[in-house]
Each structure stands twice: as C-alpha cells, then as structure tokens.
Amino acid sequence: MIPSWLGTLRPLIDADLEQRLSGGDDDISRAVRYAALGAGKRLRPALALACCEAAGGTREQALPAAAAVELLHAYTLVHDDLPALDDDDERRGRPTVHKAFGDATAILTGDALLTAAFGALAGLGPRAAQGLDVLATRTGHRGLIRGQMNDLALAGSEPSFEQLEAMHADKTGALFAAAAELGAIAAGAPATIRDALGRYGMAFGIAFQFADDADDADFPSAASDRKRRTAELTDEAIGLARPFGARGQPLVELVQWISGRV
C-alpha cells in the first residue's frame, strides 16, 4: 500500500535533508529547518526516488534530486503563505513561517531554500547540468511561477475547466514532472525515458491537484469534469509506467491511489 511505502521512504529522505540543513543556531538556520523538516508526506521526493528506480538506478543515486524538489517545494509553501499571497496563519497544524519568525525572515527563508534546492543538484555529478536545466525550466516563469501568477489572477472568479487544468499543470504538475525527470537523470536514463517519466509526473501532478480540490470542495462546478479528466490522466500515467515492469509498479500504484480520492 502506498501510505506504508511512503512511510519507508520518509526516514531516508528526512535524514538526507537533516544532514544538508544541519549546523547553525541563528534565526535563519532555525527557520530553514522549521520550513523543510516539518510534517508532510514527502511525495515529491518519493516520486524522484521511484522514478530513478524505475529507470534502473538506486535510491541513493536519486537523493540529491529528491532533496532538490523537496527544498524547492518548501520554498514555495513559505512564500505562498505570506500576507502578500495566500496570507495563511497555519500550515500542517502549526504556525506558518512568517507567523513563527516574521515576514522578513520568511522571505529570506524561502530564498535560502530555493538556493539550497539548486545546490543539492550538484550531487548529481556529471549529470548536474541536466538536472539544473530541468528544475529551472519546470519551476521558473514558464512553469510553477506562472501557475502561481495565474492562481492570483483567477482568485475570486470561477475559471473554466481549461483554465483550471492549465493552472494545475503549471503550479502543481510542473514540480511533480521535475521530480520524475530528475529521478530519470539521476539514473543516467536516455532522453526517451526522461521524457516518458516527465510526462508521467505531469499527469500524476494534475491528478494530484484535482484530488486536493475534491478533498477541499474547491471549484464545485468542475466536479464532474475533474472526475472524468482524472480517469484519463490515470490511464495515461499507467500507460507510461507499465513498460518499466516490476520496477515501475510503485508508479502505477501511486497514480491509482491518487485517482481513488477524486
């Protein structure tokens, strides 16, 4: 089952993150650890590990990629919670970073996490440049940042389903696609495998966000369309994972788990 599988991966991911973020007892060091080491499923780094294994690599090879996507994800949460964006006081049952440390420290914490994310990719050695290109492209102004901008632009409106899916592809799908493709890069996979796993990650990420929408009862007018579309995305993702055989079975089960929530 996926929850138990995630439970086996989280200690490995957390130990790696703790080592990367260890040292320093100043405010910014404490805030960075607070943001990155809190509660959470570690789904994005787990996907990087799973895709590396699917492509014939090992979990250990994928740890730099896993750290990079989780650190970047943590940065997005810190900045999204700020008063200028979502203005949230609590995340995962505890105060958000700007509530615990102040707005200025939260901004710098996000900056530090983003910098650390790209620094982690140095651990990919000769494949680091490929990893940097993927993460920068997927999460920059033509990807994740664009998705956040569209989220702000659509706030308070009832977007069309096409607008909604496009926003989800950028804001959520892009980082899952990056995680999947980075896992393939860590394994030294050829471009065809990287592309297939990147497309898997995008399909998975959009389905994941539709599941979150369903859990939160967001965009109720889109309920029937998102159920239909999630089924299509699930079939697409499974079709991309099946050729990996037993090594790709966690990818099949992951997307089935997500689609069952919609």
Image: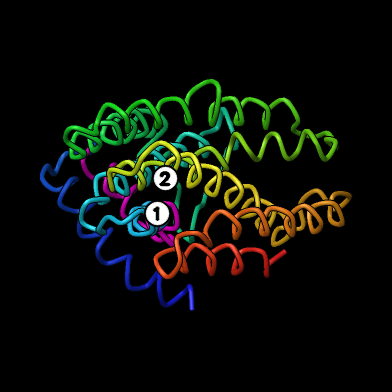
The answer to whether 229 appears left or right of 48 in the picture is right
The answer to whether 216 appears left or right of 184 in the picture is right
Q: Quadrant of residue 256?
A: bottom right
The answer to whether 140 appears left or right of 13 in the picture is right
Seen at 31% across and 50% down, the residue is 34
Give the CA separation, mark 2 to mark 1.
Answer: 8 Å
- Where is 170 relative to 214, above or below? above
Residue 124 place in picture, x, y as percent:
21, 39
Seen at 31% across and 36% down, the residue is 113
Secondary structure of the magenta portion, mostly? helix
Residue under label 2, please give it: 179
Seen at 20% across and 56% down, the residue is 60
Q: Which of the labelled discs sits on residue 51, or is there none? A: 1
Within the magenta stretch, is there residue 44? Answer: yes
Question: Which of the two residues, 218 or 240, is positioned nearer the viewer here?
Answer: 240
Tag nearer the camera, 2 or 1: 1
The residue sitting at the top extreme is 141
Pointer 2 and pointer 1: residues touching (CB < 8 Å)?
yes
- Where is 197 relative to 248, above or below? above
Span highlighted in magenta in the image: 29-46
- Which element is circle 2 on? helix
